Image (cartoon, rainbow, N blue to C red):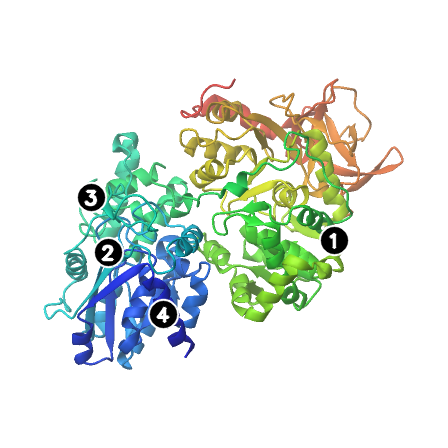
């Protein structure tokens, strides 16, 4: 009943923009309306809604759709109402999704055997250029192996290529399209707007090659879909728009345009050899098509992609651009087009609105808790955009409050006082972290990259029974060989929580987000703001609890040490289970009211570079390794908006300084130093007087002593010694009952023993000299193993060809 009513409403809305003509439907129905496999082309994101309207009566098909395309605003709810079944995209989720794909195909076979109708897109994705390309897809062939006599109805859709929902003008961005439609409706007086003419041709071809091999079958489908392929056609959105319906230039065909001459011969030979091995061909040429010539289907392609990423350590790239063996060679050399997610949606003008006092120095507001500072910012600027990522787009304080109010009661109902949060740098991580605090629970930040055994030990150590996470995180971890099955029964998926919210809950939360935050202001927030894990030099994870006072003291220190501005836009990809990712990436925008730009995967350098340009990032915090990767993969001008790059966690080599100077011409590069147990920033170079090779001056709230590493006697000025620290940023001790406390007595006071050796010059600037446990005593002298390593590396490793000389 709901599906029928919903279909009528959707058809009425679509009729305002689309004039749909259907050919052949009655003839198909006259032969029977049961047990039909419908195989449509896929020109645009909008065509599944139109197709369901065309086929709903009298066929009522079950639709199978890409789960990433369905998991969008409004679409996910519509799909749920009409019973759409989702299937993962193997190019994104890799081999770990195979079994789910096979299971869904088995369900399809069962449905068809029982006389139900099924709607399946053979290509598996929206087409990227004028002509449909089924490629080496095996789904239709696999079904016909089980049901060779099933009824096959092909559906050719024409007229949607050029729509804003197609890739004819680049990646479609659904929220922007919906906003444009909402504006166009009243401008057209609802019914007077220009229509896009769309034709659906249903055909049950008697010569369909049911028993042919897969390449022959897929070529037949391509020939049918492309028999009438209209050009890229633009249709005005309003009657007031100048110009008529017209043909516009086609977009560039997918695939890299880089020359193979840029790929080293050794890389080309290794890729060709691997492709020959996996396909059984004697030799592979650069121009060989992966599907037609080599017979690689989507399952086999996931193995090739995984091999390329692991063997050559390259970023994720757009699998749709891999058409030939030469494209795989380009990918192996890091020259392929980046992943689809690398094209962020355009930022709305409000994102760039300058806050009051933009030229002033940013300071940390007064308050006792992280949640208090967040609510202060929300009260001052409820509709200001504060965080964004590719998946969510820009989000205002009010929108974050809506998510928090929805999640809070669900999290409060979870067992145990400590709740795991296993999410990457993202808007979802911000909302989940804050909702956990407002629910009276302590967030335990879970580092899934440590491996299943380490994660299980960490959770057991602090009594975590439930872990808030996402299926995408778990799937991606599986694709990286991380087995989390031992703790799978503790996972609470955000996707499931989101689907469980009733309309009443959503409306109530929306009303509270707009008019009343009393329940958040009165929430019993725990004293511990977060628990992180660090292993240091040992194998057993150590639980590090942070109080709100620890974290806010560190934020206040940083704003005094570095000149931050209210109009800065922080680019971050460090995960919140990392101390810098929690404090300097997530809490800076949430507590200091600075805009934050997140990306979930720090290895996707090209994606991050595109985010910097799209959202005009001004500040980036990264390790030298990640900063180097981003600079290398950045296009011309993509990093020009950066004014400050802060590196840490490892020494920044001169080559990286030089590369950043070239690729980020307007940025100052500084180094800092931090320790998880110190919340975490300890020292940082000033942006007005950066000194390469040093870690800067101590933050204001720290008291330090530099002592002999064995006797703890004070060392003379300028000599290397062990760093001891005191201050409000230092944590209170590990939660592990069997781990010795890291505090020592010195000069009648208790100090945190960092285990690090430093040297301080007369200006108070520190230079890191290594970890005590990475020294050996030779002839009575302490000799640094990392120093030996750096000398050997400089002597025997050739310099980075891409890096310019240091400034």
Residue matched to label 2 = 159
Whether pointer 4 and pointer 1 mark residues with C-beta atoms closer than 8 Å, the reply is no
Disc nearer the start of the sequence (3/1): 3
Residue matched to label 4 = 103
Disc nearer the start of the sequence (2/4): 4
Whether pointer 2 and pointer 4 mark residues with C-beta atoms closer than 8 Å, the reply is no
Q: Is residue 214 left or right of residue 798?
A: left
> Compared with residue 402, is residue 32 higher up or lower down, i.e. above or below?
below
Tell me the CA gap for discs 1 and 2: 58 Å
Q: Is residue 417 visible?
A: yes
> Which is closer to the viewer, label 3 or label 2?
2
The residue nearer to you, when weighing 353 against 221, is 353
> For residue 713, which quarter of the picture?
top right
Residue matched to label 1 = 528
Tell me the CA gap for discs 4 and 1: 44 Å
Disc nearer the start of the sequence (3/2): 2
Tell me the CA gap for discs 3 and 4: 33 Å
């Amino acid at each position: 009943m709901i599906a029928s009513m919903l279909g009528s409403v959707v058809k009425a809305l679509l009729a305002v923009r689309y004039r749909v003509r259907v050919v052949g439907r009655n003839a198909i129905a006259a032969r029977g309306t049961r047990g039909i496999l419908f195989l449509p082309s896929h020109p645009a994101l909008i065509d599944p809604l139109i197709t369901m309207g065309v086929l709903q009566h009298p066929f009522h098909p079950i639709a199978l759709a890409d789960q990433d395309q369905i998991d969008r605003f409004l679409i996910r709810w519509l799909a749920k109402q009409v019973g759409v079944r989702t299937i993962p995209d193997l190019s994104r989720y890799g081999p770990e999704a195979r079994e789910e794909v096979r299971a869904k195909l088995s369900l399809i076979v069962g449905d068809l055997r029982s006389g139900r109708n099924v709607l399946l897109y053979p290509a598996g994705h929206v087409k990227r250029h004028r002509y449909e390309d089924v490629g080496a897809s095996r789904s239709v062939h696999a079904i016909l192996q089980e049901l060779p006599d099933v009824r096959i109805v092909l559906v050719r859709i024409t007229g949607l290529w050029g729509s804003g929902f197609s890739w004819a003008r680049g990646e479609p961005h659904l929220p922007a399209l919906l906003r444009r439609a909402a504006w166009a409706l009243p401008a057209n007086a609802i019914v007077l707007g220009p229509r896009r003419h769309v034709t659906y041709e249903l055909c049950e071809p008697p010569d369909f090659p049911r028993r042919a091999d897969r390449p022959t079958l897929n070529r037949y489908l391509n020939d049918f879909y492309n028999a009438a392929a209209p050009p890229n056609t633009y249709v005005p959105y309003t009657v007031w728009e100048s110009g008529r319906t017209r043909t516009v230039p086609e977009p560039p065909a997918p695939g890299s345009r880089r020359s193979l001459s840029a790929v080293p011969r050794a890389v080309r030979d290794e890729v060709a050899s691997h492709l020959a091995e996996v396909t059984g061909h004697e030799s592979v040429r650069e121009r060989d098509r992966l599907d037609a010539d080599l017979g690689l289907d989507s399952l086999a392609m996931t193995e090739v992609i995984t091999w390329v990423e692991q063997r050559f350590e390259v970023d994720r790239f757009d699998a749709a651009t891999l058409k030939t063996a030469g494209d795989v060679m380009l990918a192996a050399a890091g020259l392929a087009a980046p992943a689809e997610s690398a094209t962020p949606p355009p930022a709305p003008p409000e994102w760039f609105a300058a806050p009051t006092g933009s030229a002033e120095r940013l300071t940390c507001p007064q308050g006792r808790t992280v949640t208090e500072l967040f609510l202060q910012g929300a009260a001052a600027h409820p509709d200001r955009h504060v965080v964004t990522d590719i998946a969510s787009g820009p989000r205002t304080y009010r929108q974050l409050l809506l998510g928090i109010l929805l999640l809070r009661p669900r999290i409060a109902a979870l067992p145990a006082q400590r709740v795991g949060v296993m999410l990457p740098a993202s808007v979802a991580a911000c909302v989940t972290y804050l909702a956990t605090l407002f629910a009276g629970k302590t967030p335990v930040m879970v580092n899934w990259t440590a491996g299943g055994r380490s994660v299980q030990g960490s959770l057991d150590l602090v009594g975590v029974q439930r872990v808030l996470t996402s299926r995408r995180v778990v799937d991606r971890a599986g694709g990286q060989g991380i087995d989390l099955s031992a703790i799978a029964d503790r996972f609470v998926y955000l996707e499931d929580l989101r689907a469980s919210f009733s309309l009443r809950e959503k409306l109530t939360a929306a009303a509270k987000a707009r008019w009343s935050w009393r329940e958040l202001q009165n929430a019993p927030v725990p004293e511990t703001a977060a628990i992180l894990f660090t292993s240091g030099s040992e194998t057993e994870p150590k639980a590090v609890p942070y109080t709100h006072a620890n974290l806010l003291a560190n934020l206040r220190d940083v704003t005094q040490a570095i000149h931050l501005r209210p109009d800065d836009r922080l680019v971050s990809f460090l995960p919140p289970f990392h101390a810098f990712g929690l404090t300097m990436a997530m809490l800076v925008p949430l507590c200091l009211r600075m805009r934050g730009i997140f990306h979930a995967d720090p290895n996707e350098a090209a994606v991050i570079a595109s985010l910097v340009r799209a959202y005009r990032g001004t500040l980036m915090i990264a390790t030298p390794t990640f900063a180097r990767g981003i600079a290398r993969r950045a296009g011309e001008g993509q990093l020009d908006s950066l004014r400050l790059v802060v590196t840490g966690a490892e020494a920044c080599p001169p080559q990286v300084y030089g590369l950043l100077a070239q690729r980020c011409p307007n940025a100052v590069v500084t180094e800092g130093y931090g320790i998880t147990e110190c919340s975490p920033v300890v020292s940082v170079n000033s942006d007005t007087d950066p000194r390469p090779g040093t870690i800067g001056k101590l933050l204001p709230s720290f008291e330090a002593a530099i002592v002999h590493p064995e006797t703890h006697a004070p060392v003379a000025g300028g000599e290397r010694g062990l760093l001891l620290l005191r201050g409000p940023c230092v944590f209170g001790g590990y939660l592990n009952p069997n781990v010795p406390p890291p505090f020592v007595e010195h000069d009648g006071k208790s100090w945190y023993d960092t285990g690090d050796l430093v040297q301080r010059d007369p200006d108070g600037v520190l230079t890191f000299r290594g970890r005590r446990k990475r020294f050996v005593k030779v002839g009575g002298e302490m000799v640094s193993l990392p120093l030996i390593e750096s000398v050997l590396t400089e002597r025997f490793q050739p310099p980075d060809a891409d890096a310019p000389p240091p400034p």
